[in-house]
Image (cartoon, rainbow, N blue to C red):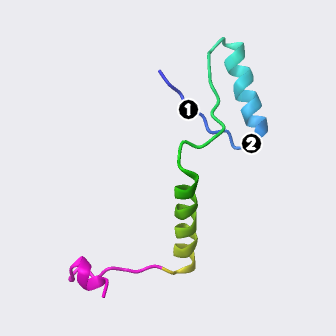
Amino acid sequence: MTIIAHPKNKKQEIAIEAVLKALNVSFQKEEESPYNPEFVAKIKKSLTEVKKGNYLTLDPNKSLWENLK
């Protein structure tokens, strides 16, 4: 079985590690994201643009190619 925890801060991280050690549960920490940093940057930029209202909406009555004109 695998359990993945997402502590919100260092205090929670330390507490989770202490509990796991006290229960003699093996665990591993992964500090780095498994995702390509360039990809993550593009996604974050896109989310920022959407929040600013910079996005296209597609007309469902048109084909994709007609929407891109």
In the rendered image, residue 39, in percent from the top left (x then y), is placed at: 52, 57
Q: Would you say 39 lies left or right of 9 here?
A: left
Residue in front for this viewpoint, 34 or 59: 34
Q: Is residue 42 above or below residue 59?
A: above
Point 55% across, 32% down: residue: 4
- Residue beneath disc 2: 9
Residue sitting farthest toward the right: 11
Q: Say which residue appears at 66% left-offset and 11% top-offset.
A: 24
At label 1, the amino acid type is Ile
Q: Is mark 2 on a helix, strand or loop?
A: loop
Q: Main secondary structure of the magenta part?
A: loop
**Gap in Å between the C-alphas at discs 2 and 1?**
15 Å
Q: Considering only vertical position in the picture, is 15 above or below 23?
A: below
Which of the 4 image quadrants contains residue 44?
bottom right
Q: Does residue 56 appear left or right of residue 4 in this picture?
A: left
> How many numbered circles does the render carry?
2
The amino acid pointed to by label 2 is Asn
In this figure, which residue is indicated by the disc labeled 1? Answer: 4
Q: Residues within 10 Å of mark 1 (few under 14, many from 20)?
A: few
The span shown in magenta is 55-69
Q: Which residue is rendered at x = 55% and y = 75% of the image?
A: 49
Circle 1 — which element?
loop
Closer to us: 16 or 67 = 67
Q: Residues within 10 Å of mark 2 (few under 14, many from 20)?
A: few
Name the residue: 24% across, 80% down.
65
